[in-house]
Amino acid sequence: MTSDDTPKAPARAVRADVRRNRARLLAAARETFQRDGADASLEGVARLAGVGIGTLYRHFPTRQHLLEALLADVYAELAAAARDLLLSPAPGEALMTWLRAFISQVTVFRGMAASAVVSLRDERPEPSRRAMCEAGEALFARAQRSGDAPADAAFTDVLWLTGAIAAVTEREPEAAGRLLSLAAAGMVPGRR
């Protein structure tokens, strides 16, 4: 019952064919995007999945929705990694390890990092992104308490900066590492 005593409709089970189509679309998108980048043809994704383009759009109304569905697994892995790193004896290094993992995970294919940055700004986060942000923020707060991260910095800003580094260096992992190190050290000697 709801608060106004009207009966609540039972949740409908998702049909097996709908679940299969969604799984096939995600597998086809992952394969297509890894080969051709995130701006690849959605018609090609639907064709590879063996469904029509209408089925793709019923599951994923926009390209960003499809990319965020692919990012959900990445975010779940990053949340688990952050929770594991909370046990590290070196909070600052644990944070840097996690930020490097973030960059590595969101640059699996061309254009994914830009979608991650867009999803990070969404005010209604999906559960996997919320879990990743909560676990990453706990890691960041631990680094702040140990003096390994600036006390006046916001985790959201650090994550956006890391996402931006990933987006501009997705084809150059070495450059991503250098830029992340530069951002962590700061640009003015002697200042945090």
Image (tube, helix red, strand yellow):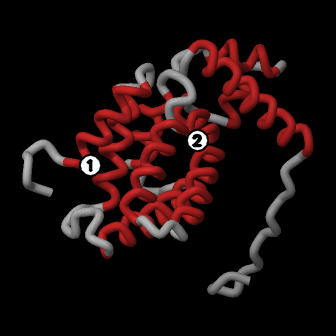
161 vs 143: above or below: above
Q: Residue at 53% x, 62% y: name it.
A: 85
Q: Residue furthest right?
A: 16
Where residue 57 appears, as percent x and y from the top left, is 66, 29
Q: Residues within 10 Å of mark 2 (few under 14, many from 20)?
A: many
Q: Residue at x 55, y 31 (%)?
A: 62
- Amino acid type, mark 2: Leu
Q: How many marks?
A: 2
As drawn, the label of residue 71 is 2
Quadrant of the image containing the C terminus: bottom left
Does residue 3 appear to the left or right of 160 in the view shown?
right
Residues 190 and 47: in front is 190
Please name the amino acid that badge 1 sits on.
Ala
Task: Give how far across and how far down residue 151 sits, in percent.
Answer: 22, 69
Mark 2 or mark 1: which is in front? 1
Horizontal arrangement in the rendering, residue 140 relative to residue 132 (left or right): left
Q: Secondary structure at mark 1?
A: helix
* Residue 101 image point, x, y percent: 51, 44
Label 1 crowd bin: few (<14), some (14–19), many (20+), radius 10 Å: some
Residue 15: x %, y % from top left:
89, 46
Residue drawn at x 26%, y 70% is 147
**Alpha-carbon span between mark 2 and mark 1:** 25 Å
At 40% from the left and 51% from the top, the residue drawn is: 96
**In the rendered structure, which disc, 2 or 1, sits on the residue that comes first in sequence?**
2
Dot 2: what SS? helix
Q: Which mark is residue 184?
A: 1
Q: Front-most of 95 and 115?
A: 95
The quadrant of the rendering that contains the N terminus is bottom right
